Amino acid sequence: MDLQVPVPAEDDPIWTAARGFVVRKEEGPLKLLNGGGEKAKVKVTGEQTGGRLSLMEMDVAPGFGNFPHAHGAEDEAFYIASGDFRFVNGAGTFEAGAGDFVYIPRLTRHGFKNIGAETGTLMVFYTPAGAEQFFLKYADDPDPAGNPPPEWTQERYEAMGEALKAHKMILLPKADDWA
């Protein structure tokens, strides 16, 4: 191909620097939430992307999901790899399924719940990165014997108050969110 535009010399780092990376299917630390009803595999962290992006793969059991909340520092996006989910978006809700993409800008109340009969999988993106650190630090590690961790209680959320504040996460549940 003979392009008629300026092109950097072939020894320029744009040609030579291998700055990309691959994360294999089995890679990434696994963390458990809500008694193991949600399993988050942290695939990409901010350390790997210069703070630009993080990615988690979440397997969510039927009936599980997260409380509506807002992020003060990150936009969040979801690609639904499998399953059926209901999302809170501000004061409303909508449903999304396999192949759908959901974008939630920062400072927008949102949450999700698996409304299907099978475990569903979400790919969860944060831009910039940062929210993945909350999961790495505060979610449960799998028990080598396979026992599930305890479900997250009101007391646990209250104990995480300062951590939520430090990560600029605001819990915003209402009794009728999933009605």
Image (cartoon, grey):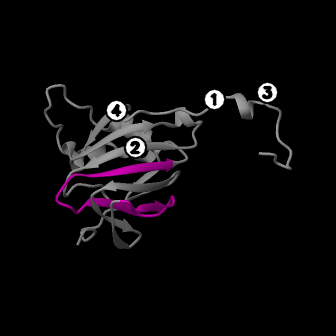
The residue drawn where x is 40% and y is 43% is 56
Q: Amino acid at mark 3?
A: Asp
Q: Earlier in the sequence, mark 4 or mark 2?
A: 4
Residue extent of the magenta highlight: 99-126
Kind of residue indicated by mark 1: Ala
Q: Earlier in the sequence, mark 3 or mark 2?
A: 3
Mark 2 packing: few (<14 Cα in 10 Å), some, or many (20+)?
many
Report the Cα–Cα distance between label 3 and label 4: 35 Å
In the foreground, 60 or 161: 60
Q: Do we see residue 152 in this rendering?
A: no
Quarter of the image for residue 175 reads bottom left
Magenta run includes residue 129: no
Give the structural element (helix, strand or loop) at label 2.
strand
Return the residue at label 4.
Answer: 26
Q: Name the residue rendered at 56%, 37% in the picture.
A: 49
Residue topped by disc 2: 56
User: Which sits earlier in the primary sequence, circle 3 or circle 4?
Assistant: 3
Marks 3/2: CA distance?
36 Å
Q: Residue 164's x, y, as percent?
A: 40, 46
- Residue type highlighted by circle 2: Met
Viewer-nearest of discs 1 and 2: 1
